[in-house]
Image: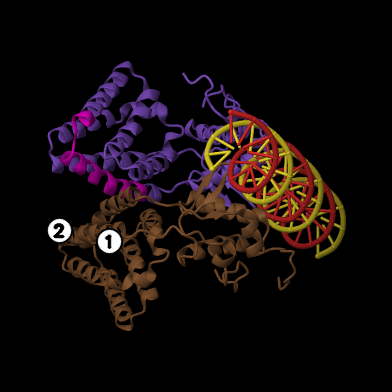
Chain colours: A purple, B brown, C yellow, D red
DNA sequence: TCCTGGAGGAATGTGCACATTAATTTACCA
DNA sequence: TGGTAAATTAATGTGCACATTCCTCCAGGA
């Protein structure tokens, strides 16, 4: 689809920026960059094969979005979120997401019900197939889906940011441990409560679900081993297969 | 010390950046920049007497924070939020702030009660003195105060962003109209409910308060008159008396 | 008179070179 | 031998110049 209907054929600028941004983000999500790692601009420029200014711009954006931390005249680092900060983020998520499920109980259309059922079904299939990577992605998208069903773009964007930040510090090298999470079961229960229009039960289930997640994450502590940037970005390129 | 007024800045880098950022933000808050205004980098560089790169950095930061909108290869503009977007932002605020007052009813310490009473008292004094500028600031700070009393930094920062974005599009040239707002009275009622530990009433009062605000704002429409940048930044300098 | 196409100019975006700052190593002295 | 200070090196930050893109204005034709 979309062979090349773009009116501006000579514009790979913003695409390159996004590619660099995505490359660094992917490295973090894949657990290649552990907390405390320093992201040197020349090294990234060399590894990703782009100019240093592009790297700088991507780093600044990532810093602003909370993925990285910058110290003036010192450099940019992968943040080491404390347990307290993770709890705070989950606390905000609890406020928003209990309100979300409550609202969905009030005004749940048939199309929304369809999408919720489909998502639960997908998660169930992923569990059966023991596809942990897919299950990891689906578990996050479930919370995004709930926000999107409210039809509020601001809410969706806000929750998306909270979700990435709350799962970042542990999702890094933990995907392989994801098999024991009670996520899919909890999600199915929440959907059942929403479809039954039981607002109180849905809110309580969401509260317990998030409390369980934060407790589980708090118990896990990332190893403090530094990693060389060249190895961290092995197989990750900014000039990835051209895709809009 | 750096007491060199020469056009060759030596060491106040981050301070200069913040000054430029604050200057643009102040111009917006003062209503000098109406929605749709284009912020040209050369003009800002000349008016604020700083290099264009500094202006670019400040603009990028303001864009990331939602104060401005950027169109690639086109420029940076003061956003014209639609009524629907304002309603969405207030919807998210409702979710968060009803949860906030509910929580404050649960765990309200004496120190918190003290600060709440003091704030209400300040607002009352501002009303008596007919100090609309001060009242405008206090009205916003009330909601920030509630978030801060929860002791959650993430929550405070998030709500601060939502508040600036929700009040931006109208606060610009409307401070002089602020006399008829029911804000102070609503705030006092909310505080009374919190101190009485009446969670349901506090949440309901907050809900009605925010609904009233969004209705009041939706009825008002900013005039679409463009303004010259030189006039907008009259009296606003980036080399302000150094103060963090 | 209105529409269209092209040329001129201004604004945005980017690479590059240099200044400044922090970290590391080395040399010197107690 | 250990500690301190200076020097070297590498990384960050910034100003500058140029390339690219977009807007505007004007001329020509239907």
Classify mark 2: helix, strand or loop: helix
Q: How many marks?
A: 2
Residue farthest bottom in this picture = B129
Q: Are marks 1 and 2 on the same chain?
A: yes
Work out whether residue B79 can be spotted: yes
Q: Considering depth in this image, is A206 or D25 the residue closer to the camera? A: D25
Q: Nearer the viewer, residue A8 or A55?
A: A8
Q: Separation of disc 1 and disc 2 at Cα? A: 24 Å
Region in magenta = A88-113
Q: Chain of mark 1?
A: B
Q: Is residue A77 left or right of residue B183?
A: right
Q: Which residue is mark 1?
A: B216
Relative to the observer, which residue lies in front, B144 or D10? Answer: B144
Q: Is residue A40 left or right of residue B154?
A: right
Labels 1 and 2 touching (C-beta < 8 A): no
Location of residue B20 in the rendering, given as x and y in whole percent from the top left corner: 59, 62
């Amino acid at each position: 689809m979309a062979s090349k209907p773009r009116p501006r054929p000579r514009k790979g600028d913003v695409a390159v920026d996004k590619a660099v941004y995505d490359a660094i983000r992917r490295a973090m999500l894949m657990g290649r960059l552990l907390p405390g790692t320093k992201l040197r601009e020349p090294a990234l420029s060399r590894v990703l094969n782009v100019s240093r200014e592009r790297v700088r711009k991507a780093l600044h954006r990532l810093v602003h979005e909370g993925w990285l931390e910058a110290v003036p005249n010192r450099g940019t680092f992968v943040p080491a979120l404390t347990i307290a900060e993770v709890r705070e983020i989950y606390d905000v998520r609890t406020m928003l997401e209990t309100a979300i499920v409550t609202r969905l109980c009030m005004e749940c259309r048939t199309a929304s019900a369809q999408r919720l059922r489909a998502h639960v079904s997908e998660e169930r299939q992923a569990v059966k197939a023991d596809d942990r990577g897919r299950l990891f992605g689906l578990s996050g998208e479930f919370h995004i889906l709930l926000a999107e069903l409210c039809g509020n773009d601001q809410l969706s964007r806000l929750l998306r940011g909270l979700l990435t930040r709350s799962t970042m510090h542990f999702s890094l090298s933990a995907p392989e441990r994801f098999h024991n999470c009670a996520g899919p079961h909890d999600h199915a229960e929440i959907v059942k409560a929403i479809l039954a229009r039981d607002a109180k039960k849905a809110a309580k289930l969401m509260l317990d679900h998030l409390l369980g997640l934060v407790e589980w994450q708090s118990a896990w502590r990332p190893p403090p081993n530094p990693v060389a940037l060249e190895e961290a970005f092995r197989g990750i390129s900014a000039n990835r297969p051209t895709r809009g």
